Each structure stands twice: as C-alpha cells, then as structure tokens.
Amino acid sequence: MGFLKKDSDFASGEHYSVVSAECYFQGTLSVQGSLRVEGTLEGNVDNARHVVIGPEGKIKGDVSAQVIMCGGIIEGNICAEMLEILGSAGIKGNIRAKKMVVEEGGRIDGQCVIGEAEVPTPAAAKTEE
C-alpha cells in the first residue's frame, strides 16, 4: 500500500494523521486523507481515504473509509470500499464493504455484508443511524 513511505510528498495533496503508540485520543476524527493508528482512539473515524490500524492499535468506535487495513482491534461498525483484516486483527462489530480479505487468524464478531449493491457511501451510512 505504501503508507507513509519515504517518497511520500505532502505537496502531492496526500495528508497523513497518526495516533502513535504513546497516544490516547477521545473524540470523532473527520479525516480527509489517511490515518494510521498505533495507539488508542475512542471515537468515530469519518470519511477517511485510508485507515491503517497497527498490531497494537485500537479503535473503539465506528470507522468509515475507502480502504481499511486492520492489524489491531476495532470495536465498532465498519463501512468501507475495501477491508483487509490481518491475522493479528480482531473486529467486534458489523461490517459493510464492497470487498474484504481476511487473513488466517483474523477474528470477526458481528455480521458482514459484502458486495456491490449493499454498501452505502460513508455519508449515507451516517444518515441511516
């Protein structure tokens, strides 16, 4: 995926936000670019392009993004175009995604709706609640 690669250029319009391992954040994040979570985030993540949850990262809230790669824990509902659940990941909540990949060892506790017609846009998912 090339997230936070050395040749990333902020002038290109790609913006990255990071919740580092030492960080604890509480509240809703509306991210227009990409987000990497290595610490703990309690609250929702809205409208992100890419969200990466590292092996020690934890989100306690709903996550809405184009692409989500989870290696840590998400306790909340997920709405995504593409969801990748790594072997170290655990998700407790419902999932709506156009595409999903689950590595061996990845855990899901909730309902999954996968497919083209069933996934609302992130803004539409918010109005359904």
Image (cartoon, rainbow, N blue to C red):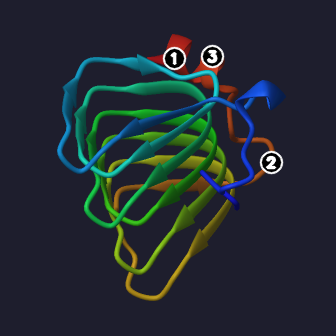
Q: CB of mark 1 within 8 Å of CB of mark 3?
A: yes
Q: Is disc 3 surrounded by few (<14), some (14 to 19) or many (20+) residues within 10 Å?
A: few
Q: Is residue 10 above or below residue 123?
A: below
In space, the residues marked 1 and 3 are separated at their CA atoms by 5 Å
Total numbered labels: 3
Which amino acid does the dot numbered 1 rest on?
Lys
| Residue under pointer 3 | 123
Question: For the residue labelled by badge 1, is the local secondary structure a helix, a strand or a loop?
Answer: helix
Identified at 46% across, 88% down, the residue is 104
Q: Is residue 102 left or right of residue 8?
A: left
- Closer to us: 92 or 65: 65
Say what amino acid the circle numbered 3 marks.
Ala
Residue 116 circle label: 2
Q: CA distance from mark 3 to mark 2?
A: 17 Å
Give the image location of residue 87, x and y in percent.
Answer: 41, 80
Secondary structure of the residue carrying tag 3 is helix
Q: Which quadrant is home to the N terminus?
A: bottom right
How far apart in space, not on screen, are marks 2 and 1 (Cα)?
Answer: 18 Å
Q: Position of residue 44 (x, y in %)?
A: 36, 26
Q: Which residue is mark 1?
A: 126
Residue contact between numbered discs 2 and 1, judged by CB atoms under 8 Å: no
Position of residue 62 measured from the top left corner of the image (x, y, whole percent): 38, 33
Q: Are marks 3 and 2 in contact (CB under 8 Å)?
A: no
Task: Tell me if 114 is positioned left or right of 56 in this view.
Answer: right
Q: Quadrant of the C terminus?
A: top left
Q: Residue drawn at (54%, 23%), measured in percent from left and top? A: 31
User: Is the residue marked by circle 2 packed among few (<14), some (14-19), or many (20+) residues within 10 Å?
Assistant: few
